[in-house]
Amino acid sequence: MAGWWGPSGWQTENRAFNFKTDGVRHYCMRCTDENQGEFYNQESWGKAVYQEITVPGKIVLTDMFADEEGNTADGMPVTLVTLTFVRHEGKTKLIMRSRFASVEGLQQGMGMGIVQGCASQFYRLDDLLKSISRGGNKVCAI
C-alpha cells in the first residue's frame, strides 16, 4: 500500500501495518511534489482499523485521521471503507465504497479533496500493477 496509497505527489510510509481483523495500519503521507505549493513537505497522518478481511474478495476498514503517535484526530472525518474484489472480463475489478460517519464528515472530506485524492491513488495503483505484472499478464485497477 505504501507504493500507491495517497494522492499523486505524496509518498506514504507505514509506521505499523497489522493486516488482520482488528489490526491497525498507522501511516503518514508526505507531499514530495514541489509543484503542490503550500502542501509541499506537509504530512498527513492516518490510521485504519481492519473490521473484516475475507480472502480473496473483501476488506472492510475504518479510516481516520491520526497524529504521529496513532491517536485519532478530533474533529476530522471518519470513513468506513469497503474494498470488494470481483472477477470481471478475466481481470480483477476493485470496487471501493466509502461511508462517512456523518453528513458533516462527508462535506468536510469533500472540501479536503477526497474525490480527487482517491481518483489519483487509483491511477497510482494501476501504474504499480502494470509495473509488477509479468509474462504478459494484464492487470487493471478500476
Image: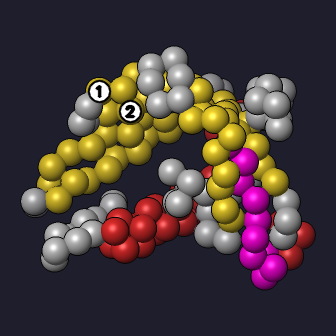
Q: Residues within 10 Å of mark 2 (few under 14, many from 20)?
A: many
Residue depicted at x 43% and y 29% = 60
Residue 136 is left or right of residue 103, and the answer is left
Image position of 104 with respect to 94: above or below: above
What colouring style does the render use? secondary structure
* Residue that carries the numbered disc 2 in the rendered image: 59
Q: Which mark is residue 89?
A: none
Residue extending farthest top: 22
Residue depicted at x 22% and y 54% = 92
Image position of 13 with respect to 49: above or below: below
Q: Which span is picked out in magenta?
A: 27-36
Instruction: Give the residue type at disc 2.
Output: Ile
Residue 127 is left or right of residue 107, and the answer is left
Please state the horizontal and vertical placement of residue 62, each as a whole percent of the image: 56, 28
Residue extending farthest bottom: 35
Asked if the stretch drawn in magenta spans residue 28, the answer is yes
Tag 1 and tag 2, C-beta contact below 8 Å? yes
- The residues bearing labels 1 and 2 have C-alpha atoms spaced at a distance of 6 Å
Asked if the stretch drawn in magenta spans residue 65, the answer is no
Q: Which mark is residue 54?
A: 1
